[in-house]
């Protein structure tokens, strides 16, 4: 079985794959990875891939060093099943590439916009010839709430859950609707603009924060919470001979 380790800015995700099938997904601290030994005891892991967008703590590094299987560290030197046209492959966050590889596996030969809503929201474009052209980075849901609070004198920290109106009636609803509507309009703006440019476009939505909103483009949008993990599994198998 394959072990996939995706270390994000907020949380780490570990997934066990049996072939192309997800057997289990475990959420863990990105500072300790304390559940790794338990995962390794429970399953017969043959190989692992690690993708990180943060510098790893001493504790996480020693957890990974204790693993008794070959580990593929995903970076700019890793062979990929899609062509990378990002001008600075060394600074690319490889969670972005993993999402693209996962989307391209499900729909090879299609133009795809991949939207990953986590700590940040990322927008990636991969074309029908499997070329990754790059994409955009914007603040994630929680980051928007925190930024409004942290960089002002009078704006409170508002929670996602609570009263929702189209246009704010008080500070609380103004912030909640401002943040949520901002993201909804941002996402639908990208989808509409990209669909205009690439009429056969498909869209993938992934990440911890899922958004359900009204759009007449629903038929081209696929939601897949585990797209990054699936892409990492594909990259690990693609590099089987090099491990
Ligand atoms: N079982 C779970 N345990 C913990 N978090 C969960 C669970 N299921 C869903 N989540 C949600 O997933 C979110 C993590 O989102 P995501 O997978 O995009 O990772 P992230 O670390 O926030 O983002 P990034 O990878 O961009 O740094 C958490 O904030 C939480 O809301
Ligand atoms: C944008 C994030 C934070 C999304 O997780 C990550 O992919 C990252 O740290 N990227 C580095 C910058 C870049 O991708 O060009
Ligand atoms: K992410």
Image: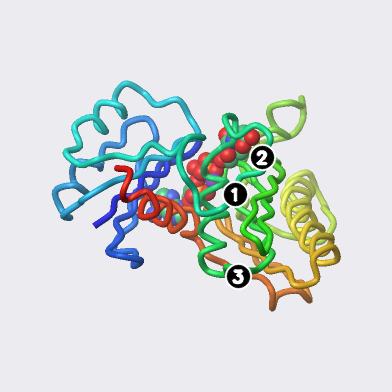
Which residue is tagged 2?
86
Disc 2 packing (10 Å; few <14; some 14–19; many ≥20): some
| 1 or 3: tag closer to the N-terminus | 1
Q: Is residue 74 above or below residue 132?
A: above
Q: Nearer the viewer, mark 2 or mark 1?
A: 1
* Residue at 53%, 55% in the rendered image: 101
Q: Is residue 174 above or below residue 87?
A: below
Give the percent coordinates (x, y) of residue 160: 62, 51
In screen coordinates, is 207 left or right of 179? left
Q: CA distance from mark 1 to mark 3?
A: 23 Å
* Residue at 79%, 65% in the rendered image: 198
* Residue at 32%, 21% in the rendered image: 58
Which residue is tagged 1?
83
Q: Is residue 91 above or below residue 38?
A: above
In screen coordinates, is 202 left or right of 91? right
Which residue is tagged 3?
222
In screen coordinates, is 198 left or right of 239? right
- Judge by depth and name the residue closer to the eye, 135 or 60: 135
């Amino acid at each position: 079985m394959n072990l996939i380790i995706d270390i994000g800015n907020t949380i780490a995700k570990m997934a066990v794959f049996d072939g192309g099938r997800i057997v289990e997904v475990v959420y863990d601290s990105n500072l300790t990875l304390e559940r790794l030994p338990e995962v390794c005891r429970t399953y017969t892991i043959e190989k692992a891939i690690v993708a990180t967008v943060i510098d790893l703590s001493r504790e996480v590094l020693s957890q990974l060093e204790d693993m008794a299987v070959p580990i593929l560290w995903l970076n700019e030197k890793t062979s990929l099943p899609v062509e990378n046209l990002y001008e600075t492959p060394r600074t690319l966050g490889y969670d972005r590439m993993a999402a693209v590889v996962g989307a391209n596996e499900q729909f090879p030969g299609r133009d795809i916009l991949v939207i990953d809503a986590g700590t940040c929201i990322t927008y990636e474009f991969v074309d029908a010839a499997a070329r990754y052209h790059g994409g955009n980075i914007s603040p994630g849901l929680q980051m928007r709430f925190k930024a409004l609070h942290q960089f002002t004198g009078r704006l409170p920290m508002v929670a996602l859950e609570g009263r929702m109106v189209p246009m704010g009636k008080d500070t609380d609803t103004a912030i909640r609707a401002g943040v949520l509507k901002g993201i909804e309009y941002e996402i639908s703006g990208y989808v509409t603009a990209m669909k205009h440019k690439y009429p056969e476009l498909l869209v993938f939505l992934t990440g911890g924060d899922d958004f359900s909103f009204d759009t007449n483009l629903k038929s081209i949008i696929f939601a897949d919470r585990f797209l990054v993990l699936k892409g990492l599994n594909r990259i690990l198998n693609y590099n089987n001979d090099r491990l």
